[in-house]
Image (cartoon, coloured by chain):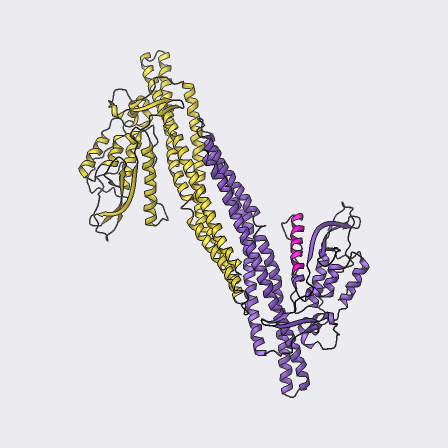
Chain colours: A purple, B yellow
């Protein structure tokens, strides 16, 4: 893949919208060119087993550790955990306002300097990380365009999702420590410095199939039958997760839409019916019990307000849950290929063992292959364990927040009705 | 109208269902025959103005008073107010179980003896009262068959509605005091006594157009222009009420149905989606965080329970409101004809006045006609005032109860969600 198209005025500006009105000047695009995603990295994910030891040297700081714990293999925790805050989305432009884009402020917790990044920079780092870590599913970015959202909503939504995305990367014990990610979160808004880091990342030898060379793990060989059974378990689990997440995501979308349309409409219908009753009462020429007429009018208003409460509810509960599920859908989508890479390594190892036992291959070639397939399996076990940690953390938080908001929501409805009921005490 | 078809085994048994299984014996039908409703009473409602004074003598106890109050003409309150409790619907049968019917126990508050009445007896008294009081809309009975209800529900529903009906009659200062109604609520389950009271009611001279003869009111003549303006106001008001009540009734029916079908289904869908997520979590081979899996399962159960709360809600709020609106629909339906009787009396009076002024009629005939049309107008004013009293009382009570139940309902939902949220504290 080539990133030579480094000129500042490149055409990869598909998150820009043309505008002739603004004269603002701001951050450029740091010379990012559109990666050609149909071209695979030279050492593709599939042939991880054939990547040779010693083809790339591994610096101490580039090493990645899988520790053996009471709960099985785990990525070694990041000794320098950090977070990144994304804030202040600003509409900026270049070419004297011909092109406009949104720049976000990214502030790592270990730094005192914030940097400015555009969606396309996120897109670039996402692609780099996906390329570098074939054994680690990198969550996809939020979708570029969400139909039906107003611009401010879209910017707000995208920032929330980018924050969630970068939080997830920061929490990953391996990914958060890699150089290219640090480059992304720290490189000042300076074209030269950006290009230097970019070129360095492009020259990284430990990407794709070579990544396993950086993995340090226990010398304990893995039982192959047990490993294969585990892989089957992973496959089943992620397949179930995929279906469940898709269903719940659709349910969220469906409920969010219904709250804003059908349910709101129903409460408006109820409101209208009470309003009509109160207006009929109001035409009593003797004007008997005007307080009752007024109180029923308040009931009508209460149900209209409840309609609005319904309309505004999804952003508090269904939308955030849906956003998490979007992230999980992306994460889960990454596992089948990671599992299949591991299966491929095991198949290759079986083949080498078979050929050696049949005398068609030198026995010396067997141990490196075993080591290689075990390393890949260790990495997968560690990554699945990390996924479960994330899942437990995320869903506990998401469900707690969802239910709390649902409770607030129904409480709001109850409170509004209580207020309406109060009026009848004075009748 | 003839009620001679008094034989115990009459065929007017359309509230009976044939059954060959029951051998119960019980109250008969007191020899009620089907009134032929297409036959109008001899002195029809429309020609009240032409009913002559002195054609029927009025006993002191049959007199009906319209008092002049600060708020205009009112029926004199019933000095012997009472209530009637309807209870213990019992399935009984006759012809050795060939016909079965429901008998209700009716217990007036002034009596120590309860009586047994069937739906057809209610139907009979409703017809008698409608016939006797052309200037007072008598609420219709609950419908005989409500499609889709189970038998127990139907019996329960009908009893509730009959109770509400008899309560309304008891609250009416004029209707509650009439002899035929007392006969209905007190006559023991004895065929002979029943027939005696029935014949007496049938021989009542003060029915229909003659009822106005029983009305005693202020000698103050009414301003005709003002009266006509009031009638227009009544017409507009009842027309508005009619539309509003119909709309709210349809809204109640619609909401009740949606709670039991669409809304319940939505909560079940949400429940299903969470259930699927919890089952997917359950297939994690490492069984990490089983408490979370369990808690999400509880969320699924909570939403299924909420679906049931929705399904069972209408009987607490929408159904009772709908029942009241059914009664009001019936009451309101009665007013246009009462208003038109009054308009007819005024038109007749204008005609007589005109003919007298043109010398085509003796002036002596004018004052009785004025007196007659004023009496009818006094009665209408009193009846409309009574309607407003009832409306204020009924809707204050109904709305208070409706809102209280709605609050309980949303509170139940909130409580159930709180319970589900609690489970996440232990994860």
Q: Looking at the image, which is closer to me, A196 or A330? A: A196
Q: Residue furthest bottom?
A: A359
Res. B405 image quadrant: top left
Q: Is residue B377 left or right of residue A347?
A: left
Q: Looking at the image, which is closer to me, A93 or A420? A: A420
Say above or below: B162 vs A167: above
Q: Is residue B7 left or right of residue B173?
A: left
- How many badges with numbers are in the image? 0
Q: Residue furthest top?
A: B359
Q: Where are the magenta residues, as a range? A: A140-167
Give percent across and percent down for residue A310: 54, 46
Give percent across and percent down for residue A294: 49, 33
Res. B316 image quadrant: top left
Say above or below: B139 vs A80: above
Is residue A162 in the magenta section?
yes
Q: Residue furthest right?
A: A192
Residue positioned 64% across, 72% down in the render: A67
From where the camera sits, is residue A143 visible? no
Give percent across and percent down for residue B413: 47, 50
Is residue A245 in the magenta section?
no
From where the camera sits, is residue B405 visible? yes
Residue positioned 77% across, 49% down in the render: A98
Instruction: State whether the magenta stretch is mostly helix, strand or loop.
Output: helix
Say above or below: A246 vs B24: below
Q: Please identify the quadrant where the N terminus of chain B is shown.
A: top left
Q: Is residue A371 left or right of residue A12?
A: left
Q: Looking at the image, which is closer to me, A119 or B134? A: A119
Give percent across and percent down for residue A189: 78, 56
Say above or below: A339 vs B352: below
């Amino acid at each position: 893949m080539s990133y030579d198209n480094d000129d500042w005025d490149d055409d990869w500006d598909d998150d820009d919208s043309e505008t002739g009105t603004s004269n603002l000047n701001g951050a450029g695009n740091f010379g990012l060119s559109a990666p050609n995603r149909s071209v695979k990295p030279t050492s593709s994910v599939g042939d991880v087993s054939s990547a040779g030891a010693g083809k790339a040297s591994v610096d101490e700081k580039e090493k990645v550790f899988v520790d053996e714990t009471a709960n099985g293999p785990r990525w070694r925790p990041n000794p320098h955990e950090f977070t990144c805050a994304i804030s202040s989305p600003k509409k900026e432009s270049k070419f004297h306002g011909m092109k406009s884009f949104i720049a976000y402020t990214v502030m790592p917790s270990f730094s005192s300097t914030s940097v400015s990044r555009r969606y396309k920079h996120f897109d670039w780092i996402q692609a780099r990380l996906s390329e570098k870590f074939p054994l680690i599913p990198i969550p996809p970015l939020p979708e570029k365009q969400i139909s039906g959202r107003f611009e401010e909503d879209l910017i707000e939504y995208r920032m929330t999702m980018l924050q969630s995305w970068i939080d997830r990367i920061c929490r990953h014990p391996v990914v958060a420590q890699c150089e290219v990610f640090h480059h992304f979160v720290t490189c000042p808004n300076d074209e030269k410095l950006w290009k230097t880091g970019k070129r360095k990342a492009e020259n990284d030898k430990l990407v794709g199939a070579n990544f396993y060379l950086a993995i340090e793990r226990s010398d304990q060989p893995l039982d192959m039958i047990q490993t294969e059974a585990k892989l089957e378990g992973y496959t089943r689990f992620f397949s179930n997760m995929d279906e469940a997440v898709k269903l719940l995501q659709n349910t969220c979308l469906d409920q969010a839409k219904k709250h804003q349309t059908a349910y709101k409409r129903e409460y408006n219908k109820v409101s209208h019916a009470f309003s009509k009753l109160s207006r009929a009462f109001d035409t009593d020429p003797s004007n008997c019990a005007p307080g009752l007429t007024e109180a029923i009018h308040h009931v009508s208003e209460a149900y209209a307000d409840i309609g609005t409460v319904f309309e505004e509810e999804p952003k508090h509960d269904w939308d955030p849950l849906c956003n998490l599920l979007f992230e999980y859908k992306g994460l889960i989508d990454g596992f089948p290929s990671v599992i299949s890479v591991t299966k491929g390594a095991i198949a290759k190892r079986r083949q080498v063992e078979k050929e050696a036992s049949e005398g068609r291959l030198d026995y010396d070639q067997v141990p490196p292959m075993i080591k290689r397939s075990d390393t890949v399996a260790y990495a997968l076990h560690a990554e699945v364990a990390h996924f479960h940690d994330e899942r437990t953390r995320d869903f506990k938080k998401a469900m707690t927040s969802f239910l709390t908001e649902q409770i607030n929501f129904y409480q709001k409805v109850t409170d509004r009705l209580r207020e309406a009921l109060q009026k009848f005490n004075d009748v």
